[in-house]
Amino acid sequence: MFNVAFAFLAFTGLYWIGFNEYSPDNRIVVSSDYPDISGNDRELPADLAGLETGDRIVAINGERTRSFQDMKRIVAFSPEQELTLTVERSGRTLTTRITPYLNKDLAQGMIGVGSYVEPVIRKIEGQTASDNPWLQPGDRITSVAGTTVRNTWDIAVLLQKGRGEYPVTVERNGRTISDTLRLPLDEGNRPQLQVQFELQAFPTTTRDLFSAAGKGVEEVWNTFSSILSFFRLLTQGINVGNAVGGPLITTFYIGESAGAGLDISVAQGIVQFIQFLCMLSVILAFMNLLPLPVLDGGFVVLFTIEWIRRKPFRPRFIYYFQMIGVALLAVLFILVLFNDITKLIRL
């Protein structure tokens, strides 16, 4: 119970103090419009639902979606379930139905869309910064190789067609600046644009303590629900090796999450670190309740059987029961560790 209590108190504290979520807004890019980037050349749910690049998904099943992350979170936990989307397009409000497909490698629902990110530079890194001193944070890229760009997907498509040098036009403080963008190439001669683009800040409303506690309960319950959803997906043939991570992968992603947050601000790094720890705490609490020897869930099963049969188990039986549990967990740990190492090598 300590893990659940920690997650509840931490979530409550975050919502009581208030924090920002950084994400692209709720506009979408339909991935089939960019087959060279997405690798999708077939009809996906977004195409069947009539979605278009630039649409805003403002609600799903009546639940408001302020950001792309809000939309992605709902879709991810709704594979093979029909959803009702409220869409804004060119000043009009439309309603359409869509059924996410199950991505078996990621164990989540997907509809074939990406985030629509404005090409406004937030940060320039690595060799891109040293080779292009004329480029500055805050610049809006308006064209690449003479072609107008609307979003970062447009830029990715145009960069694929060149070999490291591109005529680029940017807007800076109302002025138009044209110069040559020089990019390093990777081992496959693919250009590497080492640039981060602006995200939007979506503030959580600062709440009174009781409202924050209610939000803490909601977040803990949502995490439990996502775990139950994952176990349900196990029966649908998902790729468990890709979808599950062990201690090494967990540590890696904790570092990645905190690092991404710190790149925005120290406060954001702390928030994302706490959110990840809360999620991990709830997962550990759930796993501890599984009916396996050694775990608390295993003891619950033993005590329940003892209560039904009105007779305690012999100490020797309990000893072997525990040893079997230790052996199972040891084998599981080795398999998960091997899977983690394999994943890290691929990264």
Image: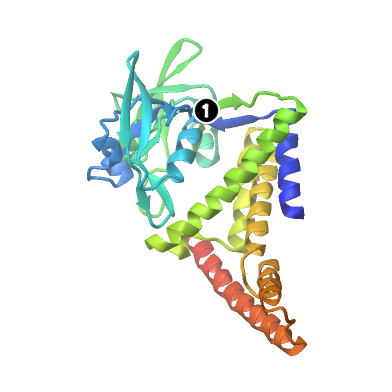
Above or below 214: residue 306: below
Above or below 12: residue 200: above
Q: How many discs appear?
A: 1
Give left or right: position of 187 versus 134.
left
Q: Which residue is mark 1?
A: 198
Q: Name the spot of residue 219 as percent of width and height, x first.
A: 63, 40
Q: Residue at x 59, y 50 (%)?
A: 224
Element marked by disc 1: loop
Q: In the image as oriented, which residue stretches furthest toward the bottom?
A: 316
Q: Nearer the viewer, residue 336 or 197?
A: 336
Q: Nearer the viewer, residue 42 or 181?
A: 42
Above or below 53: residue 89: above
Residue 66 visible? The answer is yes
Q: How is the image coloured?
A: rainbow
Q: Name the spot of residue 93 as percent of width and height, x first.
A: 35, 18
Residue 189 visible? The answer is no
Q: Quick one: quadrant of the N terminus?
A: bottom right
Q: Name the spot of residue 112 as percent of width and height, x first.
A: 33, 41
Q: Nearer the viewer, residue 123 or 57?
A: 57
Q: Label 1: few (<14), some or many (≥20) within 10 Å?
A: some
Give left or right: position of 125 versus 91.
right
